[in-house]
Image (cartoon, rainbow, N blue to C red):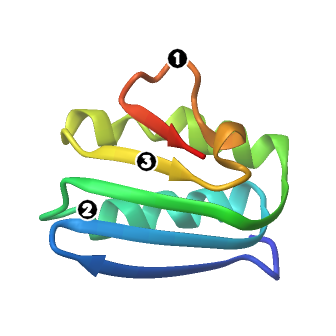
């Protein structure tokens, strides 16, 4: 995981907000996915805020995109926000929305 990567979380109602900052690499993607799996219980929407991300490594992007499918099976809507939202979004995954 990138040494400067951080994840901040908070809940409101049945929504989980996840703010990412720093560089997003393969380890960062795995850390994010593990956190989402751990914290998704009782959640209907997860907002992933990307404005504080610096660099998105292609491998990290691939790890995230190839492993986010579990959210669809759990009927949890993932909403990516911020400047880097379009980079993280799996284009073929219709269950993910992008808000700019």
Residue 93 location (% of width, % of height): 46, 23
Q: Can you identify the residue that label 1 sits on?
A: 92
Examine the rendered structure and indicate whether residue 77 appears above or below residue 18: above
- The residue at 52%/39% (across/down) is 98
- Which residue is at 28% across, 78% downward? 11
Please state which of residues 32 and 94 is positioned toward the viewer in this rendering: 94
Q: 88 above or below 4? A: above
**Element under disc 1:** loop
Q: CA distance from mark 1 to mark 3?
A: 15 Å
Among numbered discs 3 and 2, the one appearing first in the sequence: 2
In this orientation, which residue lies closer to the viewer: 59 or 23? 23
Residue 40 marker? 2
The image quarter containing residue 17 is bottom left
Callout 1: 10 Å neighbours few (<14), some, many (20+)?
A: few
Quadrant position of the N terminus in the picture: bottom right
Residue at (79% x, 43% y) in the render? 59
Q: Residues within 10 Å of mark 3 (few under 14, many from 20)?
A: some
């Amino acid at each position: 995981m990138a040494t400067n990567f951080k994840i901040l979380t908070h809940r409101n109602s049945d929504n989980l907000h996840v703010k990412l900052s720093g560089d997003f690499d393969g380890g960062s993607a795995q850390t994010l996915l593990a956190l989402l799996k751990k914290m998704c219980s009782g959640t209907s929407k997860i907002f992933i805020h990307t404005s504080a991300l610096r660099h998105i490594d292609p491998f990290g992007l691939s790890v995230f995109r190839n492993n986010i499918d579990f959210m669809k099976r759990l009927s949890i809507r993932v909403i990516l926000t911020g400047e880097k939202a379009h980079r993280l979004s799996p284009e073929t995954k219709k269950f993910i929305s992008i808000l700019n």
